[in-house]
Amino acid sequence: MSKNFLILAYKKLQQRLQRGLSYSEEDALNDAFCLLWGGEYNPSTKEEGEKLLYQTLRRRQISFWRSQKRHPQTSLTGVRIAQPPPDTNAEDTYRQIWELIKTQLTPLQQDILTRHDINDETYSEIADRLGMQEAAVRMQLSRARKKIRETYRKLRVKNEE
């Protein structure tokens, strides 16, 4: 019987928002309802059901907005992509980068980079195999890529001079 209060709150909110409801808002409402329905939430009154649904919907939207702020979606239109110098071929570039990987990275960073970028292993698989936390694997990979980028750029600038 208590789940009926949740259904009533969902229908009321859906009707109230129906006029200007976009697909993403409708998805958020449905997502919040499904989250509550599958959980151990048993509102005892209609008002409690509404309050619970509103709070869940608000929290889901805040989480969504925060994730958009942390990882904004940007268009690649007008973005200039760095190209290797015209006088070098791809094989030379490939060799240079591998030489940098062998000389500039720690053995752990080399292992993580190889496992992720060449063997297509996921972060969690690498973490399990190396006995690390997934966040530590991501951090090591990020640092390794940054070091290779910076070193390669310096090398290119030095060769152009």
Image: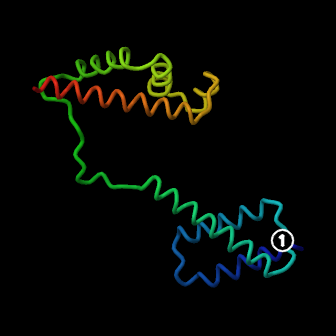
Relative placement, left or right, of 77 versus 103 is: left
- x then y, percent, for residue 135: 57, 36
User: In which image quadrant can residue 155 be found?
Assistant: top left
- x then y, percent, for residue 23: 53, 70
Q: Identify the residue at image location x=40%, y=55%.
A: 73
Secondary-structure class at tag 1: helix
The residue that mark 1 highlights is 3
- x then y, percent, for residue 37: 77, 64
Relative placement, left or right, of 133 versus 150 is: right
Relative placement, left or right, of 66 versus 35 is: left
Which corner quadrant holds the N terminus?
bottom right
Q: Is residue 32 above or below residue 123?
A: below
Q: Identify the residue at image location x=54%, y=28%.
A: 121
User: In which image quadrant can residue 95 be found?
Assistant: top left
Q: Is residue 60 above or below residue 143?
A: below
User: In which image quadrant can residue 82 be found?
Assistant: top left
**Crowding at mark 1 (Cα within 10 Å: few <14, some 14-19, many 20+):** some
Q: Residue furthest left?
A: 161
Residue type (three-letter) at the residue carrying disc 1? Lys
- x then y, percent, for residue 63: 58, 60
